[in-house]
Image: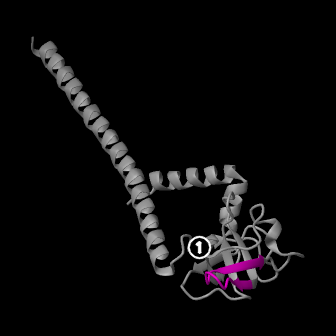
Amino acid sequence: MGWIGDTVDSVKSTQIRQLLTQAVSLGNVLSTIKVVWGILVGNRGMIVTSALIIWKGLMCVTGSESPVVVVLSGSMEPGFKRGDILFLHMSKDPIRAGEIVVFNIDGREIPIVHRVIKVHERQDTGEVDVLTKGDNNYGDDRLLYAQGQLYLQRHHIMGRAVGFLPYVGWVTIIMTEKPIIKYILIGALGLLVITSKD
């Protein structure tokens, strides 16, 4: 039983070592998957939370429900081009002719960036009515307003343009108009997170 017994014991111990090694390897793989999943979910959660906090902070500071907007058309050229990002601020100051405002129209989701060309104050209520026009358009915006609406009221106006970054908004436009680019970008970022070594 000497040589055969030693061989059997050796095989048993080798199998046990291999099983333990495989178990440890499997544990390492599962641990790695858990860490990667935690990074993906944790980082994404941190990014989303940070973005929301920054956005809400900007809303409080600027007084605008949408402190940053992207110019989507050429109606304000040559001043603002398609793809420019505008920074908005909304204060209690009266709106004046010549100011560039961003406004929402009842029944439309996308805000519009145009210049105020006429301000009309109602004598009976003191409310201000505003007429707008795109710098690159021939006529005023009454055709864009809701049916029967001749002027914008203050509640339609989201904010006044106080600054801009040229062309930075093209990222948003491209991802909206060509969704495949958005999916490729998200996939590439996911791969980057998975393959990065912290």
The quarter holding residue 154 reads bottom right
Residue positioned 67% across, 66% down in the render: 111
Q: Residue furthest front?
A: 124
Q: Quadrant of the N terminus?
A: top left
Q: Is residue 78 left or right of residue 159?
A: right
Residue positioned 60% across, 72% down in the render: 155
Residue closer to the observer: 156 or 17: 156
Residue closer to the observer: 162 or 5: 162
The quarter holding residue 173 reads bottom right
Residue positioned 82% across, 80% down in the render: 135
Would residue 73 be visible to someone looking at this image? yes
The quarter holding residue 80 reads bottom right
Q: Quadrant of the C terminus?
A: bottom left
Q: Is residue 50 left or right of residue 109?
A: left
Above or below 35: residue 97: below
Residue closer to the observer: 181 or 15: 181
What amino acid type should be assigned to the residue bearing mark 1? Answer: Val
Q: Position of residue 21 (x, y in %)?
A: 26, 34
Q: Secondary structure at mark 1?
A: strand
Q: Does residue 128 belong to the magenta stretch?
A: yes
Q: Does residue 68 belong to the magenta stretch?
A: no
Residue closer to the observer: 133 or 186: 133
Q: Residue furthest right?
A: 138
Crowding around mark 1 (Cα neighbors within 10 Å: few <14, some 14 to 19, many 20+) is: some
Q: Is residue 60 left or right of residue 95?
A: left
Q: Which residues are magenta?
A: 119-132
Above or below 192: residue 114: below
Q: Position of residue 114 (x, y in %)?
A: 74, 77
Above or below 131: residue 169: above
Which residue is tagged 1? 68
Would residue 197 be visible to someone looking at this image? no
Q: Position of residue 152 (x, y in %)?
A: 70, 73
